[in-house]
Image (tube, rainbow, N blue to C red):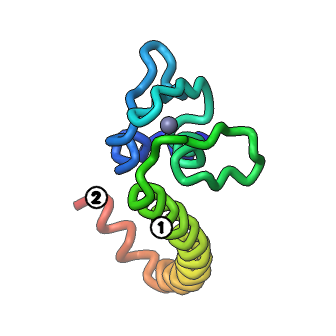
Amino acid sequence: MASESGTMGRDPCWKYCTPMEGNKNGTICNYCGLAIKSGGITRFKFHLSHTDPNSNTKKCPNVPPEVKQEIRRLIEQRNKAKAKKAVDIEEIRAELRDTMGRRHMHLIDEDDEENLGIYL
Ligand SMILES: [Zn+2]
């Protein structure tokens, strides 16, 4: 997913795996050594947390229970953050529409002053 590529390097789950050389979507599990060739850190998290919704990722046999729980929490938080972000963006959009609508009216009212500003 393009929207996640910017945050991939900072994902805390990278401490549990090694990036695959020459494959930016590949991960190698630090616990069992499994090479996951696609899906990046998102799919690796399914591997560690045993929560792949599509059940096409092998479950990690060596992940410690506390790490499994940690990853599950991370996935949960991320999902919540995403949902909240969508709401926030909608609110900001609505606010912007409102503000821009008003500012536009304002500019028309003071058209002469606005032209002076350009020459100064
Ligand atoms: Zn593993």
> Is 115 left, or right, of 22 in this rendering?
left
Callout 2 environment at 10 Å: few (<14), some (14 to 19), or many (20+)? Answer: few
Query: Given this view, does label 2 or label 1 mark the residue nearer the observer?
Result: 1
Q: Nearer the viewer, residue 38 or 9?
A: 38
Q: Residue furthest left?
A: 120
At 40% from the left and 47% from the top, the residue drawn is 13
Quarter residue 82 falls in: bottom right
Quadrant showing the N terminus: top right
For the residues marked 2 and 1, what is the alpha-carbon distance in whole angstroms? 57 Å
Question: Is residue 15 toward the left or the right of residue 27 in the image?
Answer: left
Q: Which amino acid does label 1 sit on?
A: Arg
Point out which mark residue 73 bears: 1
What residue type is disc 2 on? Answer: Tyr
Residue 66: x %, y % from top left: 39, 61
In the image, residue 25 above or below residue 115:
above
Q: Which residue is drawn at 77% across and 48% down?
A: 54
- Residue at 55% x, 41% y is 60
Q: Which of marks 2 and 1 is nearer the N terminus?
A: 1
Instruction: Answer with the quarter of the image where residue 118 lies.
Output: bottom left
Q: Residue at x 22, y 61 (%)?
A: 120
Which residue is outermost to the right? Answer: 54
Asked if disc 2 and disc 1 are in contact, CB closer than 8 Å, the reply is no
Classify mark 1: helix, strand or loop: helix
Q: Can residue 105 be seen in this view?
A: no
Q: Evaluate whether residue 13 shows in this view.
A: yes
Local SS, label 2:
helix
Front residue of this view, candidates 90 and 48: 48
Q: Residue 119 carries which label?
A: 2
55 lies above or below 100: above
Residue 68 is situated, as x and y percent measured from the top left of the image, at: 47, 56
Residue 78 image point, x, y percent = 51, 64
Alpha-carbon neighbours of circle 1 within 10 Å: few (<14), some, or many (≥20)? few
